[in-house]
Image: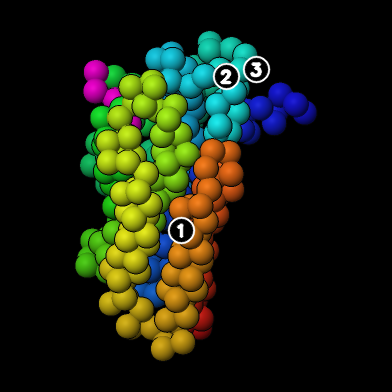
Amino acid sequence: MKKIKIWIECARLRTLPVSIAGVVMAAGLAIFKDCFYWIPALLCFVFAVLAQVVSNFANEYYDYKRGSDKKGRVGPRRGVTEGDISPKALKTVTFATLLLTCVIGCGLIPFGGLWLIIVGIFIAVFAFAYSTGPYPLSYHGLGDVAVFIFFGIIPVNLTYYVQSGIFELDSILASITIGLMGINVLLINNYRDVNDDKEAGKNTTVVIFGRKAASWAYLLNGCIAVLAIIPIFGKLPLWSFAIPVVYLILHIMIWNKLTKKDGAALNPLLGQTACNMLLFAILFCLVAVFKSV
């Protein structure tokens, strides 16, 4: 049981709402547009979750290899750093999970075409390029851009595409919203780890611009995310605007706590930010279902 718990911590479950939210958002949009198809939507869901787990595993393994993670860190416990998991075992499980992810991804080819293979390779490369390679993105202030693209733009638009067969403005707007919300999850993570990252030479945007700028970026990202999707809510019942209002209230509450906390006290805010993002997507999906009935 303890070993299972260690692997669950390694998968970083509290961050998984980031990948789930994009698929849920796209499914809601497909329902709203009357083109929802559950088989490709489910495949996208499983693929997105597995792809993020691969990225999380790879991040832990390669941060350990580079010496970026250290024992007693303020963030969640890192199994391989603390000696709970052997580096070899983590590397093996990482590539095994990547293989499973690729198999699931191939199931989307009949719905989207062979060109999805290129996208799949692109996503697989990102899962590792985020933490390793000649120019690891997370070490050069590009983690936020990567999250915006791979947890916002790509999953929302592709999940919508394999159901509808088209790309359109509404899916692009929805992907921008989810991408900005996803950046905020990373911002809190890096806000918490700024001192450790600075010591390890990991130049996140928080290290580069400082905590104050990061906290304001967090607030603005949430506000811009809501503004980006207003055109879609304009096509829904008026009462549906309660969803972005609720999101903004929760967002500002978390931001207020962010500016007053430090170290391990920030850990719950990371999960809250991710859950707020997923809640927004789920509520949007439910409104779309209600409208289509």
Which corner quadrant of the image does residue 86 belong to?
top right
Separation of marks 3 and 2 at Cα, in angstroms: 11 Å
**Looking at the image, is mark 3 or mark 1 nearer the viewer?**
1
Mark 3 / mark 2, whichever is N-terminal = 2
Q: Residue at x 42, y 87 (%)?
A: 237
Name the main secondary structure of what is drawn in magenta: loop
Identify the mark at residue 84; answer none if there is no mark: 3
Which residue is the site of mark 1?
255
Number of residues whose C-alpha sits closer than 10 Å to that of mark 1, classed few (under 14), some (14–19) or many (20 or more): many
Q: Residue 14: where, in percent of width, then height?
A: 56, 44
Q: On the picture, is 235 further left or further right than 96?
A: left
Mark 1–mark 2 CB contact (< 8 Å) = no
Magenta span includes 137: yes
Please tell me whether mark 1 sits on a helix, a strand or a loop: helix
**Looking at the image, is mark 3 or mark 2 nearer the viewer?**
2
Which residue is the site of mark 2?
71
Q: What amino acid type is highlighted by mark number 1?
A: Trp
Q: Which residues are magenta?
A: 134-138
Number of residues whose C-alpha sits closer than 10 Å to that of mark 2, classed few (under 14), some (14–19) or many (20 or more): few
Q: Residue at x 43, y 20 (%)?
A: 68
Separation of marks 3 and 1 at Cα, in angstroms: 34 Å
Q: Can residue 44 be seen here?
A: no
Please tell me whether mark 3 sits on a helix, a strand or a loop: loop
